[in-house]
Image (tube, grey):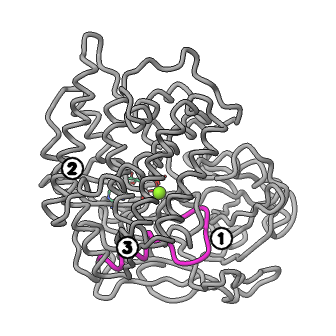
Amino acid sequence: MLPSLVPLLRSWLPRQRWFAGKGNPITGFSLVSATEILPCTAGGAAPGLLHLLVRAQQQPGTADCYQLLIGIRSTLPPHLAHTLIGRPAEGPLHGHTVYEALADPRLAGLLLERLRVPGRLGALRFTRAPGTAIASGLTPRLITAEQSNSSVVYGDAYILKVFRRIGTGVNPDLELPLALARAGCARVPHPTAWFEADPGVEAAAGAGLASVPADDPAGGPLTLGILQPFLPGSADGWQLALNSLSVQADFTGAAHALGRATAEVHTALAEALPTAVLRRPQIEHIAGGMTERLEAAASAVPALRPYREPLRAAYDELAALGDRGRTWHAQRIHGDLHLGQALRSAHDGRWSLIDFEGEPARPISERRRLQPVARDIAGMLRSFDYAARTHQPASGGAPGWSRQWSRQNRAAYCGGYAEAAGTDPRDEPELLRAYETDKAVYEVLYEARHRPDWLPVPMAAIRRLAGQREDAPPPARLPAYERPFPTPPRRTQP
Ligand SMILES: Nc1ncnc2c1ncn2[C@@H]1O[C@H](COP(=O)(O)OP(=O)(O)OP(=O)(O)O)[C@@H](O)[C@H]1O
Ligand SMILES: [Mg+2]
């Protein structure tokens, strides 16, 4: 069956926002598993639903596994025309039309039905959290926002996140909210149900179906999708921050509350999951990694080079403290925390944190490592700065006000964190500075590659972190980066 889909996928897959290998041609596909969730009856009007895990080979050695939900109909009704993948010219699907199933309310509804009834189906295993019930008959709608995965909202009651690039091992986006639910932490939507594929499990009976390979030495199921309560009427922190900047409204109360929410999540994670003490070798490793990333970024982005030495000093200082016997705590953290990962309820102003998958580009094993909470805090501090710098004051507006907004909200966030955690992240300035620098260096590389007009945003932070004035004039001509990026990134912090 896969050979008949290959020509269609070769052109359709790279056009999807969530396709990670943009800019490089796909050289081949291999089937990991195929599961018929709903058979397509010949001549019948009802659509069929096929679940596929396929590996797309790109450059030698790169083969990412993607999850596809394929709708099958004899003809596509006009309202689904935009979801077309194509019409296979041969094979078992010849004569049918295949399309993105999540956009079809009938098929997205069927997926919710599967989640209501725990059990196995071919390579797939559906699980419902104990003591939960899932209402039926909710109207599905596929979210159109640009994301690295796909999400379907069911009648404002649930949101189903369908992961697209599938790494081996349990995804922290399931693991951490489940642990937080067990710990009674109400700062995250608790998973209601989820579906996975077991490594080594035989796929559905049928011609040409492969099995899910047990290629993860750590084992563990592959997380494919998570259903959780939808928080209706909530707005994300990035949007709220930009609104506050545009009307020059105070945000410090919200920033303080967000600091508290972050601390509560960190405390619950430390109680629920393993922790560790970082000593000299681990600190050296962390500082070494940061230094390597700085060197790589400075070779790629000339604007960074004048600041190399003072930035390096932040990492050297951290390593030196480790040499002198200083230790830090490490634990499971969010891993990709920024304002866009926080939702504030319109009803009571309460913050929730979402999207615990970490940085999707990194392997799951790396994302599950124990790390200092300073990494999350630094991410959020950078986000306040990003919002303030991104915000274009209306003509006559004062850029100085945005800078002050950033300073005040960064302080309010740390203050809220300190209140709830009992320790102030600013009391470990070397660690916080090192993580903030590491993040700003990443941002510089990202902006230089993908949207050079945004480069001044992280460069201002680079100057501050290097001990210079933030507003020192930027280099006369900002260097462009040669790598293409066909899909424009979202207008948020990277
Ligand atoms: N429980 C929820 N209630 C309401 N909205 C939600 C909820 N979870 C997620 N969302 C909305 O869906 C969007 C995407 O969710 P999420 O960040 O988990 O997906 P993602 O594919 O990992 O996105 P990204 O590419 O930004 O990492 C969020 O920005 C938010 O607007
Ligand atoms: Mg994400």
Q: Is residue 259 above or below residue 244?
A: below
Residue sticking out furthest to the front: 324
Judged from the image, the secondary structure of the residue bearing numbered disc 2 is helix
Q: Position of residue 292 (x, y in %)?
A: 60, 52
Q: Residue at x 37, y 22 (%)?
A: 471
25, 359: nearer the viewer: 359
Amino acid type at image mark 3: Gln
Q: What is the number of the mark on residue 331?
A: 3
User: Is the residue marked by circle 1 packed among few (<14), some (14-19), or many (20+) residues within 10 Å?
Assistant: some
Residue to which mark 1 is pinned: 50
In what element is the residue under mark 1? strand
Residue shown at 39% from the left, 83% from the top: 128
In the image, the segment drawn in magenta is 163-180
Q: Which residue is mark 2?
A: 413
Q: Is residue 434 left or right of residue 396?
A: right
Say which of 289 and 350 sits in front: 289
Mark 1 sits near ligand 1, with its Cβ under 8 Å away: no
Question: Which marked residue is nearer to the observer: mark 1 or mark 3?
Answer: 3
Position of the N terminus, as image quadrant, is bottom right
- The quarter of the displayed image where residue 165 is located: bottom right
Q: Residues within 10 Å of mark 3 (few under 14, many from 20)?
A: many
Closer to viewer: mark 1 or mark 2: 2
Q: Give yes or no for residue 97 being in the magenta stretch.
A: no
Q: What is the three-letter code of the residue carrying label 1? A: Leu
Q: Quadrant of residue 279?
A: bottom left
Counting residues from the start of the chain, the first of labels 1 and 3 encountered is 1
Q: Is 424 left, or right, of 486 in this rendering?
A: left
Residue 182 screen position, x and y as percent:
29, 83
Q: Is mark 3 within 8 Å of ligand 2?
A: no
